[in-house]
C-alpha cells in the first residue's frame, strides 16, 4: 500500500513525464500557410486538368514548372543548396493537398524528393552542390532507380552491373517502372558488382541523362496515376565518372532502404489526400442522390461507409504525421514509416472502393471522379514497397 507521500511523488513524476512527452496536434502558422498555398494550387492548377491528363496519360509539365516556381518541388532540399529545407512533415502535408487534386501529378512532383533524398543522405559536398543545385536552380526532374524487370520487392536481387574502368565505372542493365524517367535530367541508379553478392555488392551512382549509352525507353500505359510518367531506362556501357559514385559497393542497399524510410510517409500522406477527395465527393453525392424517396445519405448502410472512410482518413493522417515527425526529430524507426505506408495505402484502396459503391452505376463511369480515385489508389499498395513488403519489415522488427 502506498503512503499519501508516495502517491504524491508518483503524480509529480507523472506530470513531468507528461510534459516531456507533450503531444501537440496544432500545426504552426507556417505549416498552415503551406497547406493553404498547396490547397489553392491544387484547386486552381491541378483539379481542372486532372481528368484530361488521366484520359490522355499526359504529364502536365507546365504544372510541374508552376509548382517549382512557388516552391512545391524539392521541398526537403537543404538551404545551402538552394532548397526550402522544409521538414518531412511539411513535405507530407503538402503531398496530401496535391494528391487531393490528382495523385498522378502529385507522384511526379514528389519524385524529385525521392531522387534527392539519397544524395542528401550520402552525397559528398561536390555532389550535393552540383546535383541538388541543379534541381533548385531550374525546374528539372530527377529519378530514383532501383527496380528492374527481375527485381522489384527483392532489391538485393538487382542485376544491373557496374564494372571498374580505370578510376571510373561502366554500367550495364535495365531499370523499369521509373517515375519521371522520360524527362529526368539525372538518375540515382543502384547497381551491383556481382549479383551473387546480393546486398553486399550494391553501390549507387548519380548518372547524367546525356551520358552515351543511357536511354529512356518504353513508357508504361498504366491503370491509374496515368498523369505520371513511368518508363524503362536502358543502360548500355554507360561510363560514369568516379566523382559520381554516391555509395560504394556494399553501402548501396542500406542507402536504398534508408531512402524508403524517409519517403514512405509521403506515400501515406498521398493516400490521405486521395481518401479525403473520395470522402468529400461521396458526402456530396450521398446528399444529392435519392432512392426510395430519400437522399441515400439517410440510409444507415451508406452512413456506415462514410463513417469508415472518415476513420481510415484520420488514422492515416495520425500515422503519416507521426512517421514524418519521427524523421524530423532524428528518430530512425522504419517500422513507423511502414505502418503509415501499409495502413494508408490499404485504407485508400478500401475507401475509394467504397466511394465507387456509394456512387452506384455513376461510380463506374468516367463522367464522375471516383473511378479515377480507385484506379489511382491501387499503386499506393505497390510502389515504394508493396503492402506485403511493409508487413515483412514490421514483422522482422517485431521478431528481431
Ligand atoms: C507507377 C509505378 C511507379 C514506380 N516508380 C518507381 C521508381 O520511381 N523507382 C523505382 O525504382 N521503382 C519504381 N516502381 C517499382 C515498384 O517499387 C515495384 O513495382 C514494387 O517494388 C514491386 O516490385 P514488382 O513490381 O517487381 O513486384 P514483385 O516483387 O514481383 O511482387 C509481386 C507480388 O509478390 C509479392 N511479394 C514479393 N515478395 C514477397 C515476399 N517475400 N512475401 C510476400 N509477398 C511477396 C508482392 O507484394 C507483390 O504482391 C514503380 C512502380 C509503379 C507501378
Image (cartoon, helix red, strand yellow):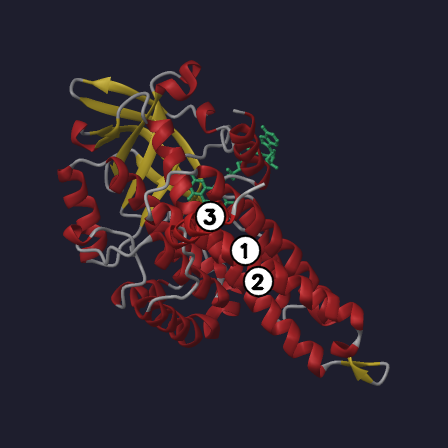
Residue 273, given in percent of the width and then of the height, sits at 51, 63
Query: Earlier along the polypeptide chain: callout 2 or callout 3?
Result: 3
Q: Nearer the viewer, mark 3 or mark 1?
A: 3
Measured Cα–Cα span from mark 2 to mark 3: 51 Å
Instruction: In the rendered view, tell whether residue 227 sits above or below residue 194.
Output: below
Measured Cα–Cα span from mark 3 to mark 1: 43 Å
Q: Nearer the viewer, residue 222 or 13?
A: 13
- Residue 5 badge: 3
- Rendered residue at 16%/44% (across/down): 130
Residue 334, given in percent of the width and then of the height, sits at 44, 38
Do the CB atoms of the residues marked 2 and 3 lie less than 8 Å apart? no
The residue identified by callout 2 is 275
**Left or right position of 140 against 6:** left
Q: Nearer the viewer, residue 109 or 169?
A: 109
Q: Dot 1: within a 10 Å radius of its alpha carbon, few (fewer than 14), some, or many (20 or more) residues?
A: many
Q: Quadrant of residue 29?
A: bottom left
Query: Earlier along the polypeptide chain: callout 1 or callout 2?
Result: 2
The residue identified by callout 1 is 316
Q: Residue furthest top?
A: 196
Residue 147, given in percent of the width and then of the height, sits at 45, 35
Q: Nearer the viewer, mark 1 or mark 2?
A: 1
Amino acid at each position: 500500500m502506498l503512503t499519501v507521500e508516495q502517491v504524491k511523488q508518483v503524480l509529480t513524476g507523472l506530470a513531468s513525464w507528461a510534459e516531456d512527452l507533450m503531444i501537440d496536434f496544432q500545426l504552426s502558422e507556417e505549416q498552415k500557410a503551406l497547406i493553404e498555398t498547396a490547397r489553392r494550387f491544387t484547386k486552381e492548377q491541378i483539379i481542372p486538368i486532372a481528368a484530361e491528363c488521366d484520359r490522355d496519360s499526359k504529364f502536365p509539365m507546365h504544372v510541374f514548372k508552376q509548382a517549382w516556381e512557388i516552391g512545391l518541388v524539392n521541398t526537403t532540399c537543404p538551404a545551402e543548396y538552394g532548397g526550402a529545407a522544409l521538414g518531412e512533415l511539411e513535405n507530407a502535408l503538402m503531398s496530401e493537398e496535391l494528391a487531393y487534386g490528382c495523385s498522378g501529378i502529385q507522384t511526379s512532383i514528389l519524385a524529385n524528393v525521392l531522387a534527392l533524398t539519397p544524395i542528401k543522405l550520402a552525397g559528398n559536398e561536390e555532389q550535393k552542390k552540383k546535383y541538388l543545385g541543379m534541381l533548385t536552380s531550374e525546374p528539372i526532374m530527377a529519378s530514383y532507380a532501383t527496380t528492374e524487370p527481375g527485381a522489384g520487392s527483392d532489391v538485393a536481387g538487382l542485376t544491373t552491373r557496374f564494372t571498374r574502368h580505370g578510376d571510373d565505372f561502366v554500367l550495364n542493365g535495365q531499370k523499369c517502372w521509373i517515375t519521371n524517367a522520360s524527362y529526368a535530367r539525372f538518375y540515382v541508379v543502384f547497381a551491383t558488382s556481382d549479383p551473387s553478392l546480393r546486398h553486399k555488392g550494391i553501390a549507387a551512382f548519380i548518372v547524367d541523362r546525356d551520358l552515351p549509352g543511357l536511354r529512356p525507353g518504353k513508357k508504361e500505359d498504366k491503370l491509374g496515376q496515368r498523369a505520371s510518367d513511368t518508363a524503362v531506362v536502358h543502360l548500355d556501357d554507360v561510363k560514369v565518372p568516379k566523382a559520381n559514385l554516391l555509395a560504394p559497393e556494399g553501402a548501396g542497399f542500406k542507402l536504398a532502404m534508408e531512402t524508403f524510410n524517409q519517403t514512405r510517409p509521403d506515400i501515406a500522406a498521398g493516400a490521405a489526400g486521395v481518401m479525403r477527395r473520395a470522402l468529400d465527393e461521396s458526402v456530396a453525392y450521398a446528399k444529392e442522390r435519392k432512392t426510395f424517396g430519400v437522399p441515400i445519405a439517410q440510409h444507415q448502410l451508406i452512413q456506415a461507409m462514410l463513417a469508415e472512410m472518415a476513420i481510415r482518413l484520420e488514422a492515416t493522417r495520425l500515422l503519416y504525421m507521426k512517421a514524418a515527425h519521427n524523421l524530423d526529430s532524428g528518430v530512425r524507426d522504419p517500422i513507423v514509416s511502414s505502418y503509415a505506408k501499409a495502413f494508408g495505402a490499404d485504407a485508400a484502396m478500401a475507401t475509394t472502393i467504397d466511394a465507387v459503391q456509394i456512387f452506384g452505376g455513376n461510380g463506374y463511369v468516367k463522367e464522375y471522379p471516383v473511378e479515377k480515385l480507385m484506379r489511382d489508389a491501387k499503386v499506393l499498395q505497390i510502389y515504394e514497397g508493396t503492402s506485403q513488403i511493409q508487413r515483412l519489415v514490421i514483422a522482422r522488427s517485431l521478431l528481431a
